[in-house]
Image (cartoon, coloured by chain):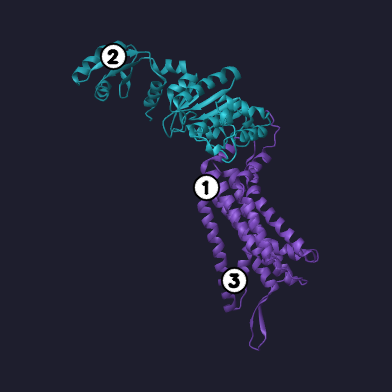
Amino acid sequence: MVKFKGKPFLEIFVSSLQEDYRLPLLEFFAFLYTLGTFALANISIVSEEQSVYGLVSSLMGVPVLIFMILVFKNIAYGLGGDLEKGTIQTLFSYPLKRYAIFLAKILSAVGVALLVLFGIQVFALVVLAPAMILPYLSTVMTTYLASLSYPLLLASVILLVTLIVRKGGLAIVIGIAMFFASTIFQSLATFITLATRSPLPLQMLSVVNPSVTLQYHYRNLSVPAENLGTEIIWAPTSTEVLAYMGIAYLLVFAVLLLSYYFFSRRMNL
Amino acid sequence: MSLIGPNGAGKTTTIKIILGLLRPDSGEVKVFGQCPWDNPDIRTLVGVVYEKVYFPTHQTTLDYLKRVCRIFGVSEDRALEVLKLVDLEGAYDRPIKALSAGMLQKFGIAHALVHKPRLLVADEMTSNLDPQARSSLLDLVVELRKNEGVTFLLSSHILPELSRVCDSVAIISYGKVLASGNLVELYDKFTARVLRVSTDNPETLAQAITSLSYVEAVDRDSRGITVKVAEGAEKKLYKDAPSLANKVEAKVLGIESGSASLEELYRLVVTKSGGG
């Protein structure tokens, strides 16, 4: 058997990058990230953990939304388009294992978008609040990880649906529906929690979206009590936050694994 | 070798299994001694041309082929070489999305030849090409076979083209091989005792001829009937066909033997098996 000497994986990765981030798309999204990050970074000197969380959360808001748009587009129209049109068959004529093609596509669609988001955010924080980053690094990282787990879960689901139905448009509709469903569920879960005084609905939501746990970790969910004080309904501890985050990322990993398995072992073209 | 059969016969499925795009429901396929599903390394030996070719659209033809050269670890000079081979050197700086259907098909062929494959698998390779381009492509196939020793596995509906470049065929229908082997041997086997009756009314005459006891198979087209007769019955048909034609108000324009085309061979095999 002739052994090839090239670097097929890198070539497919670079080719995917060229297709996913055509000029000036990436630049435009990066500009939006920057605008979203710096415009929201109305920095005052924060020296409390809770304020650091509040700052990073607000920094993440708009850029995460832009991140989701970019990633959903890359998966649904990039990979989905390749499947629909048949470009993937061309990639399968190269001497690469299926996992390598999968990895190249995912790294291009999600990895690079994530890198750009983090790059700009960390740069903004270093520039605007250098004194905050080091003392509260774990808080900053926890906030990032918690905020990104649900978008990543949505991206994984869109990926799986795209691979199964081979129609990027349908996958993106499902992703958007899931995104809005989460917002509605959060309002609903908060309402039920307040009405029943049981944190169970919010805990259930936290399994897929641990930023909810983090939110109530820093701002306890409480209601006025009969004795004019307040009754705390849910005040998750740091360990709980980490536990919910772990479960959420396990879910992301499971859906990605399922997608990988489907792509590499089950998908007939 | 060519793969021929009616629509839905399984030609594309067979090709996809050979290329490792589909897993066979049962049985085993080996390409250069390896299972194509699990061994992508064999793709260094195999080139592919699909009926509809798709490539990442925003790169130029030369840039993309250079990338393919790097993937296969061959010199980047090969990119321009294969573009010249298919008369596309003038479009080296064109984005792939700006190519016409015919040019894209040629580009697909150039893409398949980049790494000098030992086997080239092509599914309806000429489907988007004009007659002149088809002819030069077939010449290229003959040249590559002769000079580079490339083996071709071609699937096409344009049978005269296949007979020009192939010396063996596999005729398949509903996933089964009805006949396969060297073309000369297949002609001997299936077109012996085959006569071609040219007529102005093939439908009516075909019905009448079917009733003759020594007729084994009848196939008709718009200009005549292909008839397979029992051993030693050729002369009988020469005698009976005109009289039968008179009875059914048809006119026999001519009867000839031993001139079956690949198309007729194909139709005989498929008709005999009850397929198509």
The chain coloured purple in the image = A
- The disc labelled 3 sits on which kind of residue? Pro
Which of discs 3 and 1 lies nearer the camera? The answer is 1
**Residue B14 visible from this viewpoint:** yes
Residue hosting label 2: B254
Chain drawn cyan in the picture:
B
Residue corresponding to mark 3: A201
In the image, residue B233 lies at what x, y percent?
31, 13
Quadrant of the rendered structure where residue B240 is? top left
| Whether residue B30 can be seen here | no
Image marks 3 and 2: residues in contact by CB distance under 8 Å: no
| Mark 3 neighbour density, 10 Å: few (under 14) some (14–19) many (20 or more) | some
Asked if B197 appears above or below A184 in the picture, the reply is above
Q: Which mark is residue A166?
A: 1
Disc tally is 3
Q: What kind of residue is marked 1?
A: Arg
A193 over B22 or under it: above or below: below
x then y, percent, for residue A121: 71, 59
Mark nearer the N terminus (3 vs 1): 1
